[in-house]
Image (cartoon, rainbow, N blue to C red):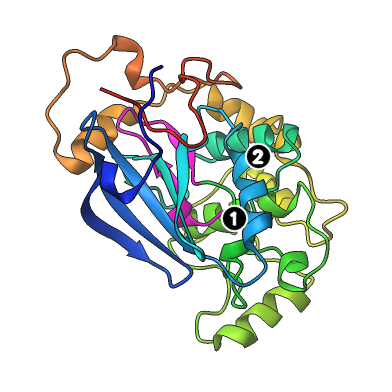
Amino acid sequence: MTTCTAWSDDVLEEISCLGDGGAAAVHKVKSKHTRKIMVRKTITTQEGQMEQLLRELSIISSVEHINITLFHGAYMSSSHEVKIVLEFCEGGSLEAIGTQGVLQGLAYLNTKKIIHRDVKPSNILLSREGIVKLGIPILCARANPFVAPYAAPEQILGHKHTNGTDVWSTGICLLELVQNRYPFPSDLPPVELLMYIAMNDVPPQLEDEPGRQWSDDMKDFIKQMLTFDALTRPTPKDMLAHPWVVDTMKQQCQMTRWIRKVWDWPRDNSSSSRADVPPSSDVHTEYPQVRFDSPPQA
């Protein structure tokens, strides 16, 4: 792949703002060279964090998996601001559907000794082809005193993170989806809510409701994901072998058709007939190798 000058604001055209969380702003951008649509995430670093942030970005640049958002590159726009260029997932944010894809992405990150630490509904995305993708792992510069309500107890208390930390967050996302409500008391102030999650050693469980019954396998799946003790909580790899996931993987999921219907997109006749079935391979080998600091040239 050929390259030109380093990534910078000059080679990207800003299209729209997708979100601004204070510590990070996200914009939809277009390459002036290739017209490719991408996402640019702007991170404002705190004093003394830049060196660690650059180390983590170097690690992220080596991550390559079908269920992880593709990293295109990064650049500094000031001494305290880093901008990361990522794949644009046109299907939007996925509110916790696609547990299999999430676990596959987390299991891959674990092989790289990476813990995501930021699994939440708005960070689970869908490509146009219906492939579930996780946003990039949390970086030191994005650390926020307010820990997300999807964080595991050990994460809230500042204890050591494990491979099971992300499993808890995924379990909360899934439970929220199937119950159509956040599984913890929603009337608590933010700090009290976090303390409730961290200190209540009886996690929420999936329970039957009038007119709605869940399989025992699914109930057990969520129960294992929400194991309170971080040391005994299963890893993403463990959960991929759970009977509920194994059975789900046998079912053909026409996610592309579903996305087309949700967003009222016309059918793309040029797409492969296999596009309706997201691949389940562990490593996506078709992504081109990208440089850390240089965008593609037309």
Q: In which quarter of the image is residue 216?
A: top right
Of the pair 183 and 83, the residue shown nearer to us: 83
Q: Which amino acid does label 2 sit on?
A: Ile
Instruction: Say whether residue 276 is left or right of residue 74.
Output: left
- The answer to whether residue 97 is magenta is no
Q: x%, y% of residue 63?
A: 60, 32
Give the mark nearer the N terminus: 2 vs 1: 2
Rendered image: mark on residue 138: 1
Instruction: Say whether residue 226 is left or right of residue 29.
Output: right
For the residues marked 2 and 1, what is the alpha-carbon distance in whole angstroms?
A: 12 Å
What residue is shown at x 83% (from left), y 60% (from top)? Answer: 160
Rendered image: mark on residue 59: 2
Q: What residue type is labelled 1?
A: Ile
What residue is shown at x 15% (from left), y 34% (from top)? Answer: 265
What residue is shown at x 50% (from left), y 68% (from top)? Answer: 182
Q: x%, y% of residue 109?
A: 67, 37
Give the label, 2 or 1, closer to the camera: 2
Up/down of 280 relative to 175, above or below:
above
Q: x%, y% of residue 244?
A: 63, 35
